[in-house]
Image: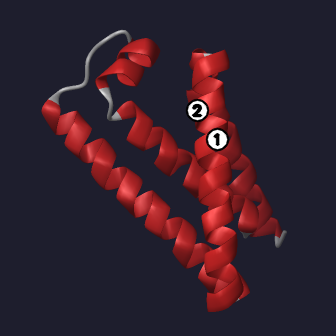
Amino acid sequence: MTTLAFALAYLGMLALCLALTRHHRAIFNTAPTSERQRWLRVAATGLLLGTAVVNVASLGVAIGLVVCLAQLMLAGLTVSLTLAWRERWVVPLGALLSLLGVLFAVGGG
């Protein structure tokens, strides 16, 4: 379940970054509309809250929240370093993490 939670954290941080004009333009070659920015921020909020819910459900409140904060920091670092190093890799990496997270959650890992 922690792999799924990390995938949610990564996608949430990615959505926050893509809500910014600079990063959206770097990835998609267009500026985001104000409605798309709003939806990216709403999606990011839901994904980041989902990270906390998954961690608390699988690890308990005390440890789950600590692990959640660590995952949020690691996801933010991963997104920012990937945007700085290979900006075109952030979306495929998000898809790969999502697939791995779901596979590990279904497999019980």
The residue tagged with tag 1: helix, strand or loop?
helix
User: Could you tell whether 31 is left or right of 99 in the image?
Assistant: left
User: Could you tell whether 39 is left or right of 54 in the image?
Assistant: left
Q: How many marks?
A: 2
Mark 1–mark 2 distance (CA, rounded to whole Å): 5 Å
Q: Which mark is residue 77?
A: 1
Q: Is residue 92 visible?
A: no
Quadrant position of the N terminus in the picture? bottom right
Q: Is residue 64 visible?
A: yes
| Extreme residue in the left direction | 34
Image quadrant where residue 70 sits = bottom right
Residue drawn 58% across and 16% down? 88
Residue drawn 56% across and 29% down? 91
Residue 15, x across and y down, in percent:
42, 41
Task: Inspect the image, locate mark 2, and give the three-letter code of the amino acid beneath it.
Answer: Ser
Residue 56, x across and y down, in percent:
61, 83
The residue tagged with tag 2: helix, strand or loop?
helix
Q: What residue did someone put label 2 on?
A: 80
Q: On screen, 86 above or below 97?
A: above
Q: Are the residues at dot 1 and dot 2 in contact (C-beta closer than 8 Å)?
A: yes
Residue 72 vs residue 91, the one in the foreground: 72
Task: Inspect the image, locate mark 1, and give the three-letter code of the amino acid beneath it.
Answer: Leu
Residue 107, x across and y down, in percent:
82, 67
Quadrant position of the C terminus in the picture? bottom right
Residue drawn 57% across and 55% down? 9
| Extreme residue in the top direction | 29
Q: On screen, 56 above or below 11?
A: below
User: Could you tell whether 88 is left or right of 17 in the image?
Assistant: right
